[in-house]
Amino acid sequence: MLLAGDIGGTKTHLAVIDPEAGPRAPVAQKEFPSRGYPTLEAIVRAFLYQTDRPIDRACFAIAGPVIDGRVKTTNLPWVTEAETLRREFGLESVLLLNDLEAAAIAVPTLGPADLHTLSVGRPIPGGALAVIAPGTGLGEAFLTWDGSRYHAHASEGGHSDFAPADAIQDGLLQFMRRRFGHVSVERVCSGIGIPNIYDYLRGSGYATETPSVAAQLLEAKDRTPIIVDSGLDTTHPCPLCAATLDLFVKILGAEASNLALKVLGTAGVYLGGGIPPRVLTILKDGPFMEAFAHKGRYRELLSHVPVHVVLTRAALIGAAIHGLEARSST
């Protein structure tokens, strides 16, 4: 059987896949807090201890650039090597791939139940597909058509420069430059980026900070869930949290269309990662799509690009697909 994994900066999902059942029907699965373990090996060891399923191969989707079977995770202090994992667990083979490449592999297999469509658009058959995923960090990937099937390609586009689209974002860039020097788009368009936006808006007096939220943030190890939950709370609204999410989705919309233009993603843009499903009510409101289309002479082209939110664990599915395909080819 195949051990498939989606390893992110916050959560690690592992699943045992029976080739006969297919990539979307795991016979065992579990979620682990990534930061609670010193290495991926430690998580795999804990998972295998809890399941009695025989494993002979593994395929892991990891947030970071995979080079020669080795990856240093971007938002975790881990270095993972395929050969080390193979030897330690006595497996026939171990494959590592970028998590967004894995998510992209899954995209052509996704159905209506896996997606929420923000814009139907008019997809061009055989056009490229773009995948952008804000989770702990910001991942980007794309797919190209060879005449018979789509092929996924990894990238590290989330670490390219943040390009502000208006005066408020100009101020955010200056704020972030003082804090970090280089400002990648991940610094403002991800789980680690949301508190940065909050700090900027609070310091500039843009909106009112709710005292109860401020008290929670002082005690929190991870401020992002508090900001997101408070920004979505319509019963006891926090103006500063709401403004933070509004700016976040505008930045996400602009970066999603940046990616669509760079790869000419005329067949569709897919928003993956853990954040878009969580803020779906805001994504549907309008600021996201307006920011997506705000590209001057290319507004009309972008208005025809379909935009979907991925509601399922696409990277885990993609890792399973990749691992099973590699198995069948040997």
Image: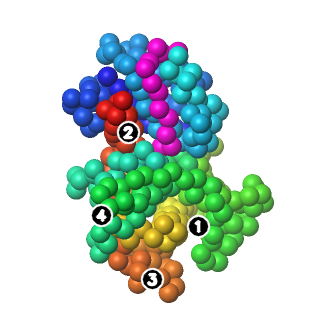
**Residue annotated with mark 3:** 299
Quick one: SS at disc 3?
A: helix
Few, some or many residues within 10 Å of mark 1 (<14, 14–19, 20+): some
Query: Is label 3 in contact with label 4 (beta carbons under 8 Å)?
Result: no
The one nearer the camera, 16 or 196, is 16
Name the image quarter holding residue 240.
Answer: bottom right
Q: Amino acid at mark 4?
A: Thr
Q: CA distance from mark 4 to mark 1?
A: 31 Å
Quick one: SS at disc 4?
strand
Residue 158 placement (x, y as % from top left): 58, 56
Residue wearing tag 1:
207
Q: Is residue 203 left or right of residue 222?
A: right
Q: CA distance from mark 1 to mark 3?
A: 30 Å
Camera-near label (1 vs 3) is 3
Kindly identify which numbered label has been placed on residue 117: 4
Nearest-to-viewer mark from 3 and 2: 2
Whole-number angstrom distance, CA of label 3 to CA of label 4: 19 Å
Please tell me whether residue 13 is drawn above or below residue 45 in the rendered image. below
Mark nearest the camera among 3 and 4 is: 3
User: Which residues fall within the magenta stretch?
Assistant: 88-99
Q: Which residue is mark 2?
A: 322
The residue at 29%/57% (across/down) is: 148
Depicted 26 relative to depicted 154: above or below: above
The reply to whether residue 210 is visible in this rendering is: no
Cα–Cα span, label 1 and label 2: 46 Å
Crowding at label 3, few (<14), some or many (≥20) Cα neighbours within 10 Å? some
Which of the two labelled residues, at mark 3 and mark 2, occupies the earlier sequence position?
Answer: 3
Residue type for callout 2: His
Query: Quick check: marks 2 and 4 in contact, CB under 8 Å?
Result: no
Q: Give the percent coordinates (x, y) of residue 72.
A: 63, 36
- Assess whether residue 93 is covered by the magenta stretch: yes
